[in-house]
Image (spheres, rainbow, N blue to C red):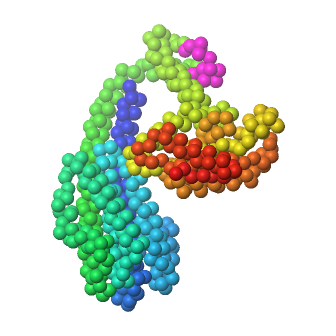
Amino acid sequence: MVVALFSQYRSIRGEISALHEQKDAYVRSQSTSRLIHALQKERGLSAGMLANPTAKRAAKLQKQYEETDSVLAQAQIPGLQAGLLAVRQQVSGGTISWADARELYTASIDEALNAIAVKVMTGKPSNTMMHMAIVELAFAREDLGLIRATINSIYARGTDELADVTYLAKEEGKFRDHLNAFQRDMASQEQSVAMGELLDEPYEKVIGQVDDVLQRGPRTATDKPQEAWWADATRVIDHFKAMEDTLYRNLLQSADMEIANKEQELERYVMVAVGFGLVIALLTAFTILRILRALGILITTLDDVIKTENYSIRIHGESHKDEFGRISLSLNNLLDFTDALIRDKEKLAATDVLTGVLNRRSFMEAATREIGRANRYQSHFALIFIDIDHFKGINDRHGHAAGDKVLAHFVHVLKKYLRKSDMLARWGGEEFVILAPEANVDEGYQLADKLCTEVFATTFAAAGKITCSMGVAQWRPGESFDELSQRADKALYEAKEAGRNRVCRAG
């Protein structure tokens, strides 16, 4: 009972510690959000500078550099300062294109946004939806920042190009998606957000100007519309940032309240536990030595059970009354041990005995879960079907034992170039399959081409040189695993028909 009381105490202390860690995560997220805001401004001003460099634009950009550096010093993100310095030097010298500069800035911002998004999954369930809403608002703000920078570049040049229009249309669509997701997530919160206040007249003016640029292009090449656009768009982005800060404050207030409540609960529990512990100590003091002796017998017996795996061994104590409690404890330990054996058995059942990778059944279960995850989070993944070319000839010439060695060596070669998140399984015979999460068809093709090349470059001790053919398909929203695998298998067949030792994409 004393152990149970202490365990409960540690549990409450653990919850308090977890709440403090979550609060620290909110603070770090908010700090990262400030850095993102500064980088967005720097990116937008760089667009105007690269399109039409002037002393006025250079002064504004230099001032923004100083503001960004100030925020960066507080965020303490290793490696970012050096990368920013390199981009700034190229922007100042005009030796980088706007598209390349935008890509470099956006990559840093995306990395920071993704770091914030990851913290959502580690949050308490009560606050996860609120944190997710903040992340969606941050992504919407980033999309609006890219729109601001792109139009700033267009106004600075006084003309737009097809690439600008395409990029602008894409970012506007992403912006609306993230904003809708923010509204959806906030709708489930007890605390409401006045969307009319967020989407006010300046917002409507900015969105109208975006639509105007998409439809008719910039109306003049002077600085006046560019300055007006920058001021209007910045005002809206700052408004979004202010809303984000408000929500973070609410999260922090909620965390402080939960911490205070838990600490009060702990204080009450400690007082009750101390009193109850004293009573227990008085009632059990006269048996403490016998319990210690019994623990020695218990530990020795359980060690014998674990070492010999002999379930016929029984624990014998000094009295029937004491033995009853000890037998219960022994059964629990034996059940834990049995559970471990069952887990090992299930693992073996999910694994191909020859190659050590997933078998077909377990892979299909994992693929079904991945499809559910992709549907839920609107992500994607690539599926790669693999077949060893002329494998029957290997068995015929060298024997089935050599063929088994080739399969094991083949898997070893593949696994060296796969990510930890990639899933490799034996589909059957000499056929294998790879599921690459978060990979599109081009990334899946690159991975498959790399694997195909490495297999060709490898000498297999049991059979010499071998080749393989691969088919790659990207999962489409709403597509079943059977439909996806049929497309990947068709691509594999095309690779075979085209001469083998190659990779084909699915249509």
Q: Specify the farthest residue to the bottom.
A: 55
Looking at the picture, does residue 345 appear above or below residue 314?
below
Q: Is residue 306 magenta?
A: yes
Looking at the picture, does residue 38 appear above or below residue 220?
above
Q: Specify the farthest residue to the top.
A: 320
Is 383 in front, or is 96? 383
Side of 98 relative to 304 (left or right): left
Q: Quadrant of residue 276?
A: top left
What residue is rendered at 48% in x and 13% in y? 323
Is residue 9 in sight in this rendering? yes
Looking at the picture, does residue 65 appear above or below residue 504?
below
The percent position of residue 221, horizontal first and vertical second, equals 32, 86
Is 115 in front, or is 465? 465
Residue range of the region highlighted in magenta in the rendering: 302-315
What residue is rendered at 51% in x and 77% in y? 86
The percent position of residue 474, horizontal first and vertical second, equals 50, 50
